[in-house]
Image (cartoon, helix red, strand yellow):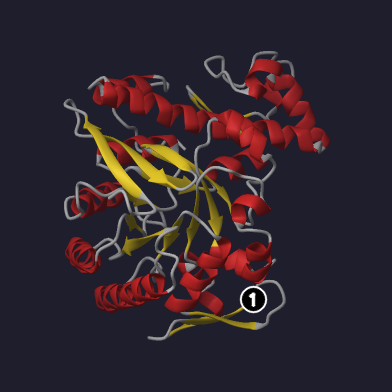
Amino acid sequence: MGNEAVHFTLIKTCAQSGARLGRVHTPHGDVDTPVFMPVGTQAAVKCVSPEELDEAGASILLANTYHLSLRPGGDVVRGAGGLHKFMNWPKPILTDSGGFQVYSLKSIRGVSEDGVMFRSHIDGSPQSITPERAVDIQHALGADVIMAFDECVQLPAEYDYVSESVDRTARWARRCKERHESSGRAGSSALYGIVQGGVYDELRKRSAGQITEIGFPGYAIGGLSVGEGFEDMYRVLECTCSELPVDKPRYLMGVGSPDYLLEGVLRGIDMFDCVLPTRMARNGTVMTSSGRLIVRDQAFARDYEPLDKNCGCYACRNYSRAYIRHLLKAGEVLGIRLTTIHNLSYLLDLMKRARQAIMDDGFLTFRESFYKGFAGADGQPPARIW
């Protein structure tokens, strides 16, 4: 284990719930789990600086392979010394493979055994991503954790197509591993495999078996939070996590609402990422200990309380709802910077408190207390909060 670039230590399993406390060791520092990773799609988390992310408590960021391959290009980032130096972030970085963009660019793509053909959203130029190229680009970016190239199937999807996609994802994963191990980069970064399978339990189990047979130092669960109901998500998580190694980290991709984070932790997830907190912030909406607050609303024009009286972030320590609303209505950039700092701080602090609850063998009690903070909640997750 000591010779691996990135490895995982399972520190504790909560006696009350089964939730996990762990630590991912990387060349750029350790990451305590469960953890939320802010998303810096284009090597920047929107509206905040690396120093502000550090103050908010971020220990690892995510950057997007597809976007950075088009602009500024992997060679430019490599020439700067990798993403860490390019964006002035000394802590760990994870890059996704571009697989989700295959899903989101469905109207301009062609999927084959070789990879994916599409046109750039920037200038319309023809582009392709193969498993090998996805690995090469991520090596150029220099992330600590890189992801195998996969296909994220659009929902709803027929069983037969998802079945074909699962097998293709496994073949692509094997090609990614071969490229990673032959590149000379395996000693400085770790390649995680991705489990797919839509909402079909049988296919999730098959995918998990295929990907774990190939063998990776970490495993991601993709293809969720793409339109399925929360009941399906929770069922798939339970089904999939039961098939994954206990001693490897589990990463649920693209999930970032507070309730989904806690429900994921309860079911054995260690890592999360999502654009939700920054997107909500840009729309004038913040996460608080009593639920969603649309601070742009007229109701807060003379409200001189902080966004959340239970939050100690920079925005809540220094500014009122009334002032932040004024900034948002006036189109001042400071307004969305403050809502962004708050939302990220809120989620990062939620994960910090979840880790402590696991350490104290009290995660179920913590989860119940969290839900009781919402009007009408009885300590169990409502249908949806966010």
Nearest the eye: 243 or 277: 243
Q: Answer above or below: position of 47 versus 225.
A: above
Q: Answer above or below: position of 68 versus 383.
A: below
* Number of residue marks: 1
In x, y percent, where is residue 26?
A: 42, 47
Nearest the eye: 137 or 254: 137
Identify the residue at horizontal 71%, vertical 26% (top origin): 298
In x, y percent, where is residue 321?
A: 68, 21
| Callout 1: SS | loop
Three-letter amino acid code at the position of disc 1? Ser
How crowded pointer 1 is (Cα within 10 Å; few <14, some 14-19, many 20+) is rated as: some
Left or right: 112 as drawn, with respect to 68:
left
Nearest the eye: 65 or 186: 186
Quarter holding residue 311:
top right
Identify the residue at horizontal 65%, vertical 70% (top origin): 75
In x, y percent, where is residue 232?
A: 27, 52
In x, y percent, where is residue 60?
A: 50, 43
Residue bearing the label numbered 1? 120
Identify the residue at horizontal 56%, vertical 79% (top origin): 108
Determine if residue 283 is in view: no
Left or right: 150 as drawn, with respect to 237:
right
Nearest the eye: 52 or 157: 52
Residue at the extreme front: 3
Q: Answer above or below: position of 11 versus 104.
A: above
Determine if residue 271 is in view: yes
Quarter holding residue 383:
top left
